[in-house]
Image (spheres, coloured by chain):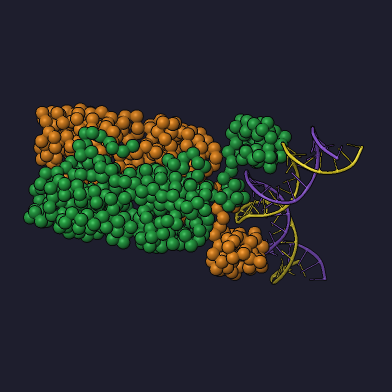
Chain colours: A orange, B green, C purple, D yellow
Amino acid sequence: MSDKTARPTLRTIAQATGLGVSTVSRALIDAPEIGAKTKARVRAVAQEVGYRPNRAGIRLRTGRTNVISVVLSTEVEAFGLSSFLVHGLSSRLADTGYHLVVTPFSCGSDPIDPIRYVVESAAADGIVFADTRPDDPRARYLLDRGFPFASHGRTSHEHRHPFVDFDNRAFAEMGVAQLAAAGAQRLGFVAPPADLSYGVEMRAGWEHTIAHLGLSGQAIGDLTSADGMCRIAERLTPLFADGSLDGLLCGSASAGLAAAEAARRAGRRPGGDLQLVAKEAHDVLRWAVPGAITYGENFRRAGYDLADVLLDHLAAPDASPRSVIEKPQRCPLDWQTGHVRA
Amino acid sequence: MSDKTARPTLRTIAQATGLGVSTVSRALIDAPEIGAKTKARVRAVAQEVGYRPNRAGIRLRTGRTNVISVVLSTEVEAFGLSSFLVHGLSSRLADTGYHLVVTPFSCGSDPIDPIRYVVESAAADGIVFADTRPDDPRARYLLDRGFPFASHGRTSHEHRHPFVDFDNRAFAEMGVAQLAAAGAQRLGFVAPPADLSYGVEMRAGWEHTIAHLGLSGQAIGDLTSADGMCRIAERLTPLFADGSLDGLLCGSASAGLAAAEAARRAGRRPGGDLQLVAKEAHDVLRWAVPGAITYGENFRRAGYDLADVLLDHLAAPDASPRSVIEKPQRCPLDWQTGHVRA
DNA sequence: TACGCAATCTGAAACGTTTCAGGTTACATC
DNA sequence: GATGTAACCTGAAACGTTTCAGATTGCGTA
């Protein structure tokens, strides 16, 4: 009667044990009204026949999808940072029964479209997105309908939803202090986009510390994307050459690379007559620009934490949402000491 | 009667139009036995009420999941290449109704485990995986049970399944020829792992061209992972310093970075008294090592193509599977010319 | 003996979809 | 007027799960 090719279901186990389907279901869920012996027997048979619950059945019945959706821009970002985010997310989700689905959105369209799609088609139990703005429409939309999510980056509603962020303000503060300590007098800042939360934070840290230490500093603009690297290098070269800048805070690793190229062209040596501070999200910069002072931002950890705070929120929707803010950690100057991060 | 908060279903449309549920279903699928007028009416109402088919219902009924699963190692790979793969996959899948789920596997465990999980729990209609070996157990497993998949990298069964690959053999051949043309006499090769298909291919290209051009060449080992960068640099430095190597073929971007560091320490200048050839999968190398000769491997495109060949295979399982082999493309030497790739 | 009660177990219904086997028209043909 | 047939539509069943409202048993107690 039982087909060799058919997947085992609750009914398979029920027939094998002589129990009812609902009993088997309750037993596998470890419900209190099922006897210990029965549970053991059911579990044994389930194991033996290789039972795997049918997600579609569960999903249809309960409405829960057991899916977390991460919404990513399909644009080619400079260094593939979202890879680390995705890895971190999936490593946290690995043994939870949750699947991770990647929902893309193309830059041309409204970033809220994929979010709306997930919500309207109930495609996931929770959403993760990145690159927040202070007043983020996606966060507003999701908060309005009470749909669980976690953001990479803070928002002005950050107390109402879980989020994970790197402390970009502290990074800028520490970076400027570092530059000053290394003897730089005339500081520059390749600033990240001013409309994104992390840009706002980093600027605040920069401005505060510049003022606090009584230094002179000039911001160089918004050009931290790969497309802007040539422009950044061109912009910086004369400033390095004529000495109007002897220290630079870079808002991203790509800005750091561009600055290194400018230094090369201007005949300056990072770590010598020019001080460079940059964030780095992988080990490239340490190799590519030996004299640079770098702080690690761990995107993989961020992904892990995003999944973690989101799972907490799903388990206890009424508890006040948890958030994680990663403090900047100084990477060793000398590449030979190897990796800083796990 | 109709609840404002409830999602519209086929029944909602059936009641609104006065038709039967099955008629509505057939109409939306554009079945031939439904009249044109009825179809139009159904579609209009569906649109109006914001109907979205319930994936769980479809999946339960049909057994099709409308999911493609990409199986990724959770290890931190040097430069986040899988990000590009994922982006490419999801951009191809965007308007197809397929969702992309990321299934991780930790390096400690058997790489076939997540594959087995997907197959046994019928979690997807097709699988994508990478880093193939010539006789790949995952490919064998999937072929044995007739489960559709596409691999990034060739296998010894490559005529029996769709795959996408970069022509690593051609890369090595072109690279060695380039090195020779640039005047290098004593060539070295930082070789990728010999057990992976791309390593085998690249080695074959290297050996063939070395022999064909009558050059002397030495392979430096398997050390292309981020962990090995320090070791590669240490190994190369004396060889560069004493001139026993004046040209180097690098199997990866990270090997290229390590070689650049070794060149720095040995007082050699890439593009001058030392020739460097490397693959690069993003723009880092061009910035980090100005004098290097690089060939672009487009992982984003590879992801797109992987989804493409897999979709074809799903649509016509009996047709002979399609594959795509990307030819190496020389990146412009001068970074100022900007991007080569789309 | 009858009763109450806790401990276990059970069948039926429902989630939303597609498929199957028919049912109802309208209309042309005999 | 009866019959055949094409065109269009329909209800019931099924996919695998959980939940709900009981059913059955065993057992201690009145």
**Residue A171 at x, y = what percent?**
26, 39
User: Residue B243: x percent and y percent?
Assistant: 8, 54
Number of residue marks = 0
Judge by depth and name the residue closer to the eye, A225 or B28. B28
Q: Nearer the viewer, residue B139 or A118?
A: B139
> Is A31 situated left or right of B135 in this image?
right
Report the quarter where the N terminus of chain A lies: bottom right
Check the image and report above or below for B271 versus A26. above
Return the x and y of residue D26 as percentages of the image width and height: 70, 71
Which quadrant: the C terminus of chain A?
A: bottom left
Q: Is residue A151 visible?
A: no
- Closest to the observer, A137 or A10: A10
Residue A190 appears left or right of A270: right
User: In the figure, is residue B135 to the left or right of C13?
Assistant: left
Residue at image x 46%, y 42%?
B93
Using residue B187 as the reference point, say whether residue A163 is left or right of it: right
Q: Report the residue that reaches farthest toward the left.
A: B242
Q: Going 56% across and 66% down the picture, which residue do you hit?
A: A49
Q: Position of residue B306 (x, y in %)?
A: 41, 48
Residue positioned 16% across, 49% down in the render: B180
**Res A122 seen here:** yes
